[in-house]
Amino acid sequence: MGHNKRQLWMAAVAALILAVTALSLWAPPGPALTAFGDLAFLALLLVATGVMTRNAVSMPRFRAFWLLMALGCLLWAISAGFWAYYEVWLRRDLPDPSSGDVILFLHVVPLMAAVALRPHRLHGDRPVSFGTLNFLMLLVWWVCLYAFIVFPDEYVVLHPIYSSNYNLLYLLENLVLLLILGLSATSSGGAWRRIYWNFLTASALYTLSSETINAAIDRGQYHTGSIYDVPLLVAAGWMVWVALLAHRLPLEENRSPAPASRWMDVAPRMAMLAILSLPLLGLWALFLDPEDEKLRNFRILVTLVATLGLGLFVLVRQFLLDRRLIRLLRESRRSYERLERLQSQLVQREKLTALSQLVAGAAHEINHPLTSILSYSELLAANPALQDEQVSLAHKIGQQARRTRDLVSDLLSFAQQSPAEKALVDLPSVLQRALQVHEVAMRGKNIRVEISFEDNLPRIWGNSNQLLRAFLHLIENAVDALEEVGGGSLFIVASRENDDVLVRVADTGPGMPDPGRVFDPFYTTKPVGKGTGLGLSATYGVVQDHLGEVSCYNRPEGGAVFVLRFAVACEAAAAKAAQF
C-alpha cells in the first residue's frame, strides 16, 4: 500500500474515533448512539482483519504470524458482531450469559500463538506442523480453563459468580499476552521491536479499557457509545495502524539468529505448562472443590477430556519429532560420508600433485644415465670375448635397465597429466574401444565379459583419449585379478542416475586387500616387476580432471568393483564454466 493511501486510511480511522468521542460526550444515549458505537468498533476490527490477512499474503516468510493475528482479530470481530446483532438489529440487550463471551475469550489465543512463534528470530526450516500443534494445545488449554472455571456457573448451574470469574480469567489471559509481547519486544531489535511495542501498547490499552468497561457494567454506568468505548476504539485503530506500518518496514532485514539455550520458543513452554497444570486442576476438583457433586464431577470430566486431548497432541508431536530426528540423523550421516569422501579426495589430490612435481624433474634426470647403461650393456653383451657367465650378467643388466626405463616412462606419463581439450564423449563407445584393446589379452584365459549399456545414455563433457586410458587401466587390473584365480567374469555397466552417468567395472576375482588405498601412488598388489602402482592413480587423476568421482569396494560374493560417476554434458559444462 502506498504512503498516501496509508495516510488516508489512518486519517479515516482517526476521524471515526474523534466522531465517537464527540458523540459519546454530547449525544444522549439511544438507538442511534448504540448503533454508531457498535458498528464503528466492528468496522475497525474487520479492517484490522483484512489488513493482517493482506500482510499474510504479501509476506510469505511471516505468513503464520499474520494469519494468527488475523484470526484473533476475526474472532474479536465476531464477538463484536454479537453485540451489534442484539443491540442494533434486535434492539435489545445482549443475553446474559451469551455465547459471544466464549468467542471473545478465545480471540486472545491466536494472538498469543502468533507472538509465541517469535518471527523476529531465524529458526531455520521449522515445520509448520509444530506451530499448528502448539497453537492447538494452547487453544485446548484455555478452553479447558474456561470450561473448568466459568462454564459450570454459566450453564451447568446458573450462578451470578460466573461473570466475575469470567472477568478474572479474561484479565489473566490478556496479562499473559502482554507478558509474551513484552518478552518479545525486549529480546528483539529494529523493525520487529517497533512492531512488538506497538502491539503491546494497543493490547495494554485494550486490557485497561476492557476492565474499566466491566467495572462500569457492574456499577450500571455503561451504555454502548459512551466515553468508555473510546479507549476500546483507539486500541482497535492502533491494531490497524501497526498492521499498515508493518507492510513498509524491513522486517526480514531485522531478524536475528535464535539463541541456542536461554531463549527457547515460547509456545512449546506454554504447552508444557498447560499439560503440567491439568493434574493440579483435577486434584483440586477432586479434593478441594467446595461446590456440590454435580459441578465437581463436571470439572473432573473437563480435566479428563482436556488431558486426553493434550495427551493425543503430545503423542502426535513426539511422533513428528521422532521422524524429524531420524531424517536429521540420515542427513547427518550422508553429510559425514560426503565430508569423508571430500577429505579423501583432497588428500589424494595433494598426494598426486606433490608426486607429480617430484617425479617430473627426477624422471628426466634418471633417463639420461639410464639410456647410457642400456646402450653399454647391449654393447657389452655383444662382445665375443666375454664368457657365457659375463654375457648373462650383461643381459640381466640390460633387462633391469629396460624395466627401469618403463618405470620412468610411466612416471613421466603420470607426472605430465594436464587438462586436455574436451568435447562431448559417448562413454559406451570409449568402453567398447577399451575392451577391443584387451580382447587379445583375454583369449584363452577363461574370462567372460558381460556388458550392459543403458539405451540413450547421455554424453559427458570430457577427453576421449584420457578416458580411454583410464578404462584401459581398470580393465587391465580386472583381467590380471581374474587371471590369478584361473578365470571368471568381467562386468561393465553404464547407466544414468539422476543427472550423472555411472560406469561400473566389476570382476569375480579375489578382490582388493585394502580398497581405500588403491588410488595411492605406487600401491600395488601385483607381483614385483608386473606393475608400478601408478595406473589407478592416473585413473583417479583423469576422473578428477573430468569433475567426476571414482570409488572402489569389494563385492560381498567376491571381486572388486570400481564405480565412476560423471555429470551429464550440460551439468559438467556448467560446473566447468563456474570455475573460470
Image (tube, grey):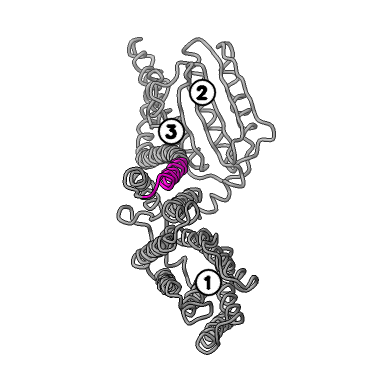
Q: Report the front residue among 202 and 175.
A: 175
Q: Which residue is mark 1?
A: 247
Report the quarter where the N terminus lies: bottom right
Q: Which residue is mark 3?
A: 537
Magenta stretch: dominant SS?
helix
Q: Which mark is residue 555?
A: none
Mark whose residue sits in front, 2 or 1: 1
Query: How many C-alpha atoms fall within 10 Å of the one at disc 3: few (<14), some, or many (≥20)?
Result: many
Q: Which residue is mark 2?
A: 476
Nearest to N terminus: mark 2 or mark 1: 1
Q: CA distance from mark 3 to mark 1?
A: 60 Å
Q: Position of residue 218 (x, y in %)?
A: 43, 71
The answer to whether residue 391 is left or right of residue 88 is left
Nearest to N terminus: mark 2 or mark 3: 2
Q: Where on the picture, by quarter, is residue 8?
A: bottom right
Query: How many C-alpha atoms fall within 10 Å of the one at disc 2: few (<14), some, or many (≥20)?
Result: some
